[in-house]
Amino acid sequence: MKIAFATKDNITVNDHFGWCRTFAVYDVMPGGFNLLEMREIETDSSSEGSESDKIEKRINSIKDCTILYCEDIGSMAAARVIRNRIHPIKLSQPESIYVLLTKLIVVLKKPPIWLRKVLEREK
C-alpha cells in the first residue's frame, strides 16, 4: 500500500496539506517499507489559483496512495481527499516519517477495522 507524507524536510511530517510542496511516498507492507519517490508540487511564482485548484493539484499528486499523513488539513480538503479514497491522518505535532512507518508495520499485523476496510478495497 502506498502512503503519502506531507513534508518540508523529507524526514518529518511537518507540513499542512494545502501548502505542502513535497510528498514523500512510501510503499508499505507487513514486512517493511520502501521510499518510492518524492513528489514535488509545481507552483508558479505568483499564485496557484483558487483554493479548489490547490487542493486538486495535491490530490492528483497522491491519487494512488491509500493514506495521507499531514500536520494539518482543512475540512474542505479532507472531505475531497476522502472522496478520492485516501484516508487522511492529521498529526497533532510533527513526527518522524520513519517512526510512523515503523508503527504502521506493527499495526498491519493486526489492523483496526478502518484499516482492514482500506486494505480490502485495494484487493
Image: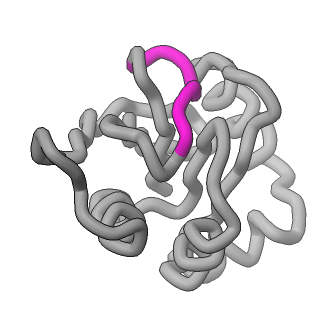
Of residues 110 and 19, which is closer to you in this image?
19
Q: Which scheme is used to colour this image of the protein?
A: one colour
* Magenta stretch prevailing secondary structure: loop
Tell me: residue 68, above or below residue 57: above
Residue 120 highlighted magenta (yes or no): no
Q: Residue at x 88, y 60 (%)?
A: 112
**Region in magenta:** 10-16
Of residues 43 and 86, which is closer to you in this image?
43
Residue 104 % position (x, y): 70, 39
Residue 53 % position (x, y): 31, 70
Q: Quadrant of residue 118?
A: bottom right
Q: Is residue 111 left or right of residue 71?
A: right
Q: Is residue 92 left or right of residue 46?
A: right
Can residue 95 be seen from the camera position used here? yes
Residue 56 % position (x, y): 35, 71
Q: Residue at x 23, y 56 (%)?
A: 48
Q: Quadrant of residue 25?
A: top left
Can residue 123 be seen from the camera position used here? no
Of residues 118 and 94, which is closer to you in this image?
94
Q: Residue at x 25, y 36 (%)?
A: 37
Q: Is residue 116 left or right of residue 97?
A: right
Residue 16 % position (x, y): 55, 41
Q: Residue at x 25, y 42 (%)?
A: 39
Of residues 3 and 79, which is closer to you in this image?
79
Tell me: residue 67, above or below residue 102: below
